[in-house]
Image (cartoon, rainbow, N blue to C red):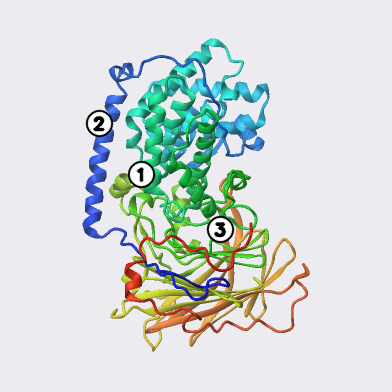
């Protein structure tokens, strides 16, 4: 349930929305496993057919004369990345490989993900950025190596979404790969692209649900647009793109995976496709226009003050310049709204401060492969400096790091009994069939907000710990009108009609009963410098711009401690950075526990040493947010498909 109430221009008009989703109960888990087993059996059978000589003969046909149009690749290329590839360093999602002079297509791959990224050729744009004869020759040599080793068939390289990405990448970098090339190389490349396009037209719907299926459909559309005699493929590709956008893009413009990085990637491809259609004199289908118009404000929603992405549900910061490249194509210049009820996020903006909060349930199972157990986590940036973050995600370091980054402890939120609020695929058999899905998590997440002259209030709760421990986690936030004071309250309350459950405490049980140990974590950005006071009552954090922020916390009716511990920042995607985290620990006895905490800006002059003599008062948030009426039952029933209200204070971009 999400309510947007108050606001400087709206008064007290409630817009309720309940966000409730049961991820996978035992019955439909069996159903999903059965369907996945049938699909895998079909995949293996079809792969056996596709790899045969008779099938390959069916892919023969006219050879295109040329790549008729080079779409613009909005993903910025990097010269330093090209230098690394020159040296045989292939640091791609799924692993890091040093080729030692061999072709990357001849070395042992660390994972299927790495192989997909390698065969997708998205990295070839870095050679375009480098330019020059050496980059051109090296890129063409790699394309020729792929055609030699995998051009007839490759179990991973010929998956629909991998073909889609490869055809898009080759067409977008056509000038690098084609111009002034010799006739033999040129004809070999074009003939192979046509074969891939014909196979993709037959198999596009076999791509996994979500971003990968959109990638396959967009690649099919590009193959029809950029290769001669491709009219049928263009029409089929555009139809499928429209169908998938209707399925995957939510009414508020977010992607169904709830992953900001997927939001950016899909939007970059759609804008490139839209511009290519216009340049070639084709009409742009309405589903593509609508999706781009809705997704742009949502991308702004996820943008921090440094111009990069917030780190939720598998996202990293995004490639340098990619967010701005996408937003520069926004004709409407739509402003970000305060909350996204369908995607399940809240955004608080005041003064130089942005706070983004995950207030949604996990995505549906088939779209949850990148989802994290980060419900009610938040990120905070001040100007261009990030202060509080989540750890982020990186797939370059392999499956173990990927799994660790998804845990609740890798997020700035409360962790109960060192246990994540969501569970992921367990068991080798399930992982083979279902992948790394999120299998069980919060079934009900509620949030509501109020905006007034004083600031922005947010009240949210989730039941991800109810099944295991019988507790509901509630988080309340207040951001002052100046943006210089963020107050919070995290509480654990016994769920209604839920008997006490066995706890596994960090400390010995006391005479009052078995306590549930909890930790409220605040991961800090690596550029923030933190120091814990001698009496351990507060933490001073210095940002790169010279501003100082003070953190204080206390636990109601119980023992607590504030510590400064090591953390890791994975938001840079291609590297890890050491960082720190503030951890407030305590124990919940019997029915509840409450932690009050506050972030206060100590200086507006750029000097962290000019701290005020008085200490910030710990927050005393009201029991109910001001101006929020109780939700009427009839309003709940009508709230299911409301579009997001753009109410209250909006910060110009």
Q: Quadrant of residue 218?
A: top left
Q: Residues within 10 Å of mark 3 (few under 14, many from 20)?
A: many
Tell which circle, 3 or 2, labels the residue nearer the N-terminal end.
2
Tell which circle, 2 or 1, labels the residue nearer the N-terminal end.
2
Q: CA distance from mark 2 to mark 1?
A: 20 Å
**Label 3 vs label 1, nearer the camera:** 3
Identify the element where label 3 is drawn: loop
Label 1 belongs to which residue? 209
**Label 3 vs label 2, nearer the camera:** 3
Where does the image place residue 117, in percent across and percent down from the top left? 48, 36
**Label 2 vs label 1, nearer the camera:** 1
Q: Quadrant of the N terminus?
A: bottom left
- For the residues labelled 3 and 1, say whether their Cβ atoms are less than 8 Å apart: no
Label 2 belongs to which residue? 45
Q: CA distance from mark 3 to mark 1?
A: 28 Å
Residue at 59% over, 24% down: 175
Label 3 belongs to which residue? 336
């Amino acid at each position: 349930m999400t309510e947007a109430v108050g606001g400087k221009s709206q008064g007290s008009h409630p817009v309720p929305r309940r966000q409730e989703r049961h991820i996978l109960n035992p019955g439909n888990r069996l159903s999903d496993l059965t369907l996945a087993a049938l699909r895998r059996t079909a995949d293996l059978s079809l792969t056996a057919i596709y790899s045969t000589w008779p099938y390959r003969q069916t892919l023969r046909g006219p050879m295109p004369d040329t790549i008729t149009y080079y779409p613009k690749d909005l993903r910025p290329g990097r010269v330093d990345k090209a230098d690394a590839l020159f040296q045989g360093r292939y640091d791609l999602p799924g692993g890091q490989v040093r080729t030692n002079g061999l072709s990357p297509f001849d070395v042992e791959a660390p994972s299927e993900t790495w192989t997909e990224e390698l065969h997708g050729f998205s990295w070839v744009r870095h050679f375009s950025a480098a330019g020059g004869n050496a980059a051109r020759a090296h890129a063409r040599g790699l394309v020729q190596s792929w055609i030699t080793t995998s051009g007839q068939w490759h179990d991973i390289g010929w998956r629909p979404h991998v073909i889609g990405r490869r055809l898009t990448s080759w067409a977008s970098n056509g000038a690098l790969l084609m111009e002034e090339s010799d006739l033999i190389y040129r004809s070999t490349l074009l003939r192979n692209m046509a074969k891939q396009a014909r196979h993709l037209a037959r198999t596009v719907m076999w791509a996994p649900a979500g971003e990968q299926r959109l990638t396959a459909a967009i690649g099919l559309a590009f193959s029809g647009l950029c290769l001669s005699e491709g009219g049928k493929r263009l029409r089929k590709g555009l139809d499928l793109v429209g169908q998938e956008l209707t399925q995957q893009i939510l009414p508020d413009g977010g992607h169904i995976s709830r992953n900001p990085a997927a939001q950016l990637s899909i939007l970059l491809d759609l804008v490139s496709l839209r511009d290519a259609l216009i340049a070639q004199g084709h009409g742009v289908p309405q589903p593509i226009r609508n999706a781009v118009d809705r997704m742009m404000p949502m991308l702004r929603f996820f943008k921090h003050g440094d111009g990069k992405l917030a780190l939720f549900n598998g996202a990293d910061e995004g490639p340098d310049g990619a967010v701005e490249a996408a937003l520069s194509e926004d004709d409407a210049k739509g402003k970000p709204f305060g909350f996204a009820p369908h995607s399940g996020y809240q955004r608080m903006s005041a003064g130089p401060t942005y706070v983004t909060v995950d207030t949604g349930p996990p995505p549906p199972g088939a779209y949850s492969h990148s989802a994290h157990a980060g419900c009610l986590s938040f990120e905070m940036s001040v100007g261009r400096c990030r202060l509080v973050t989540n750890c982020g995600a990186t797939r370059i370091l392999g499956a173990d790091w990927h799994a660790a980054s998804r845990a609740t402890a890798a997020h700035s939120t409360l962790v109960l009994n060192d246990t994540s609020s969501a569970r992921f695929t367990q068991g080798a058999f399930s992982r083979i069939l279902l992948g790394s899905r999120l299998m069980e998590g919060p079934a009900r997440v509620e949030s509501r907000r109020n905006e007034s002259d004083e600031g922005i209030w947010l009240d949210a709760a989730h039941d991800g710990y109810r099944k295991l421990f019988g507790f509901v986690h509630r988080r309340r936030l207040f951001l002052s009108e100046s943006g210089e004071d963020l107050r919070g309250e995290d509480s654990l309350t016994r769920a209604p009609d839920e008997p006490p459950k066995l706890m596994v405490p960090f400390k010995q049980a006391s005479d009052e009963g078995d306590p549930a140990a909890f930790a409220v974590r605040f991961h800090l950005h690596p550029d923030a410098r933190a120091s814990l006071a001698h009496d351990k009552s507060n933490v001073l954090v210095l940002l790169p711009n010279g501003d100082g922020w003070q953190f204080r916390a206390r636990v109601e009716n119980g023992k607590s401690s504030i510590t400064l511990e090591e953390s890791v920042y994975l938001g840079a995607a291609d590297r890890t950075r050491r960082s720190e985290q503030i951890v407030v620990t305590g124990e919940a006895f019997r029915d509840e526990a409450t932690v009050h905490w506050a972030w206060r800006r100590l200086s507006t002059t750029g000097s962290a040493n000019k701290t005020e003599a008085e200490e910030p008062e710990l927050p005393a948030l009201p029991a109910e947010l001001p101006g929020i009426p109780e939700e009427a039952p009839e309003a709940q029933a009508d709230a299911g498909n409301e579009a997001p209200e753009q109410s209250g204070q909006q910060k110009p971009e």
